[in-house]
Image: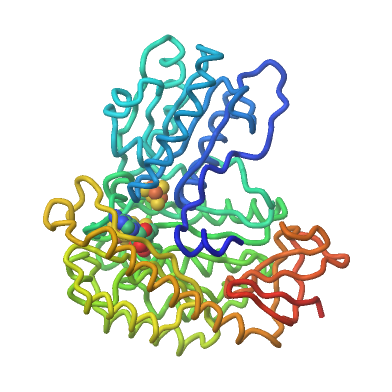
Amino acid sequence: MDFENKIIDESRQGEALIKDGNNEGSKKLFLESYGCQMNFADSEIVASILIDKGYTTTQNYEEADIIFVNTCAIRENAESRVRQRLQDYKKVKQKNPDALVGVLGCMAERLKSQFLEEEKLVDIVVGPDAYRDLPNLIETAESGQKAINVILSKEETYADISPMRLDKNGVSAFISIMRGCDNMCSFCVVPFTRGRERSRNPESIVKEAKEAFDAGYREVTLLGQNVDSYVWAGGGLKKEILTEEQKANAVNFAHLLEMVAKIHPDLRVRFSTSHPKDMTDEVLHTMAKYENICKYIHLPVQSGNSEVLERMNRGYSREWYLDRIKAIRTIMPDCGISTDVITGFCGETEEQHQDTVSLMKEVKYDFAYMFMYSERPKTLAERKFKDDIPEDVKKRRLQEVVSLQMEHSAYHTNKAVGKTFRVLVEGVSKKNKEELFGRNSQNTVIVFPAGNHKKGDYVNVKVNRCTATTLIGEVV
Ligand code: SAH
Ligand code: SF4
Ligand code: F3S
């Protein structure tokens, strides 16, 4: 894993789908995804819908009849990357004027029809809740009109669509358990691009996880912007309107975790993202109870200063957050913990930044994803506060937290030397074909000589040495 990339920006960039179809004569689809894991999971829904309609897939955009790019809007640079990429697609259109270019996902939702005006080359714009409409939209575009559907839904969860797995390894699958977000953190564009929070029917989630296991997958990651607020009381009823009786019978996130963990002891369960304001001890106890629920929690803090957290509208204070860390460490002493940090948020003083530094020193995270604040149109912060921290100060603060995190990551990997971990093999190491890699329960990557082992196997690996982010060992 690329440390630099991992530590600065979690978003995967422009990975194209990797399974090529071989349906002679049918139209060729090139689908590329940016952004978070939810976007990658959505691309699997999109691929499933289009393959059902007879499309085959290609890894080479130059030979595509239709190019879709699933976009992210979280920070300005996520959007500029997509704009740059559109320049490459221009070439395809020059060669094949009938080729169509479609923009999907969060940036499509944010810009709506403005996208069609700004980027003349784009034919189709589709928001995250409108993928069922893709076949119609393509037809419209084929008839020469521009096509757009950016309607957000309060119900859509794509529960009945079996995703076309596009991952590289066939070991680890992502499953969306909810969509949207109701939190309105003041810096964040997601509530605007993905709409209201809604949970998916737990039966459809368990069914999908079972199917993945039967297809050879050995790990599922349950995805939501705030998994701790998952609730299913039948028919997707919202939390706020539940009666006492409905509440008592509702499936919450702890229950859902247990349901998925029970599918098979050899199916590892991970999840992302936990929200500090909503993470319950019940979830932690469920994690502790099942060996196959990985001992790893991503708990984004954003800032270590309570006033900044208040301005961010995060719904917790520094003290509350540290209490949640204490609960994790008490209930699961061996749990890996990671976080997200934003530097240079509106009005952040040097002292407030130092509070983030001191919180990081107190928690000593295993990993962290760190970002400079990037103002997003329409968000609460854009409307209420001034983006007043100069770029160079944001950058200096970012560098400070990044180098601190390097030390902490190295501290954790060094502590792991000499220990033995159960590792799920994910594939052949990029650097050395004779070696395999996988992760331990705590989500740290371990590399070791392959022997007779193969991806999908569980092996016990003793760690002999490490880098700042990777453990190196041998099977015992
Ligand atoms: N739902 C998740 C976060 C999803 S976005 C949660 O609440 O934790 C992933 C991360 O991007 C956030 O945790 C935050 O650290 C970062 N981020 C979001 N908006 C940002 C912005 N405007 N500028 C910089 N970083 C941002
Ligand atoms: Fe954005 Fe906050 Fe929702 Fe996370 S919880 S997606 S940061 S609004
Ligand atoms: Fe980006 Fe949308 Fe995910 S804005 S981070 S792709 S929810």
User: Residue 159 vs residue 394: left or right?
Assistant: right
Q: Is residue 316 above or below residue 456?
A: below
Colour theme: rainbow
Picture quadrant of residue 292: bottom right
Image coords of residue 309 (percent x, y): 23, 71
Q: Is residue 99 above or below residue 469?
A: above
Residue sitting nearer the eye, 444 or 404? 404
Q: Say if residue 232 shows up in the picture.
A: no
Q: Residue furthest top?
A: 143
Which corner quadrant holds the N terminus?
A: bottom right
Which corner quadrant holds the C terminus?
A: bottom right
Which residue does the image show at 58% across and 75% down from the upper left?
Answer: 468
User: Residue 42 vs residue 381: left or right?
Assistant: right
Image coords of residue 167 (percent x, y): 63, 48
Q: Residue furthest right?
A: 452
Image coords of residue 119 (percent x, y): 35, 25
Q: Is residue 383 above or below residue 228?
A: above
Which residue does the image show at 65% across and 65% down from the upper left?
Answer: 267
Q: Residue furthest left?
A: 384
Image coords of residue 68 (percent x, y): 49, 30
Residue sitting nearer the eye, 348 or 14? 348
Residue sitting nearer the eye, 65 or 158? 65
